[in-house]
Image (cartoon, rainbow, N blue to C red):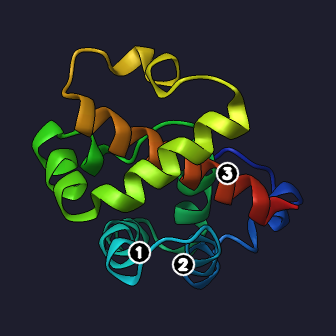
């Protein structure tokens, strides 16, 4: 069970965190349909596991953390192999946005394969950005 993060009034801030809104934001970022579907499978599992309110809190609390399903290096490498052009494009965008190399942005992930690090960077950064976007 997720520890409650928000009081009753504050929970209204999370109302825009819905599966449809998350999916639409991923398309706005230029993600391909196939990539979005892979991410949505994981998010839908979390939604079904927690229910609407707790999913909204879980998604908001990702805050530059990775959903645990993507922690697996082999899973991340498979995603890279299927979506390498998209991942590389997003990595370049993140480098331009942050003015930091992807290596610096993934210093906490140095123990894993370069391709997996890039996938994990893109997923954690973009999902966190989507969460913040949906709160405004």
Q: Which of marks 3 and 1 is nearer the N terminus?
A: 1
Q: Earlier in the sequence, mark 2 or mark 1?
A: 2
**Residue under the point 40% across and 61% down:** 86
| Residue position for label 2 | 23
**Residue under the point 88% across and 61% down:** 136
**What distance separates the C-alpha of mark 3 from that of mark 2?**
13 Å
Q: Quadrant of residue 17?
A: bottom right
**Residue under the point 29% across and 56% down:** 84
Q: Where in the figure is residue 29, as x and y percent of width and height?
A: 61, 67
Q: Which mark is residue 100?
A: none
Q: Where in the figure is residue 19, as x and y percent of width and height?
A: 54, 79
Left or right of residue 121, residue 61 in this image: right
Q: Quadrant of residue 14?
A: bottom right
Q: In terms of depth relative to the viewer, which is nearer, 109 or 94?
A: 94
User: Is residue 20 positioned above or below 113 on the image?
Assistant: below
| Residue position for label 3 | 129
Marks 2,1: beta carbons within 8 A:
yes
Q: How crowded is mark 3: few (under 14 residues within 10 Å), some or many (20 or more)?
A: some
Return the residue found at the far left: 74
| Residue position for label 1 | 36
User: Is residue 12 positioned above or below 19 on the image?
Assistant: above
User: Is residue 37 at all visible to an observer of this figure?
Assistant: yes
User: Is residue 1 at all visible to an observer of this figure?
Assistant: no
User: Is residue 45 positioned above or below 69 on the image?
Assistant: below
């Amino acid at each position: 069970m997720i520890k409650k993060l928000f009081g009753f009034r504050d929970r209204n801030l999370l109302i825009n965190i819905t599966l449809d809104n998350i999916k639409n934001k991923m398309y706005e970022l230029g993600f391909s349909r196939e990539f979005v579907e892979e991410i949505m499978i994981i998010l839908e599992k979390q939604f079904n596991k927690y229910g609407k309110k707790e999913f909204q809190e879980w998604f908001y609390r990702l805050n530059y953390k990775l959903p645990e399903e993507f922690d697996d290096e082999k899973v991340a490498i498979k995603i890279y192999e299927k979506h390498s052009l998209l991942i590389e494009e997003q990595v370049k965008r993140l480098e331009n946005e942050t003015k930091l190399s992807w290596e610096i942005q993934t210093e906490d992930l140095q123990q894993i394969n370069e391709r997996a690090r890039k996938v994990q960077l893109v997923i954690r950064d973009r999902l966190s950005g989507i969460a913040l976007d949906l709160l405004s």
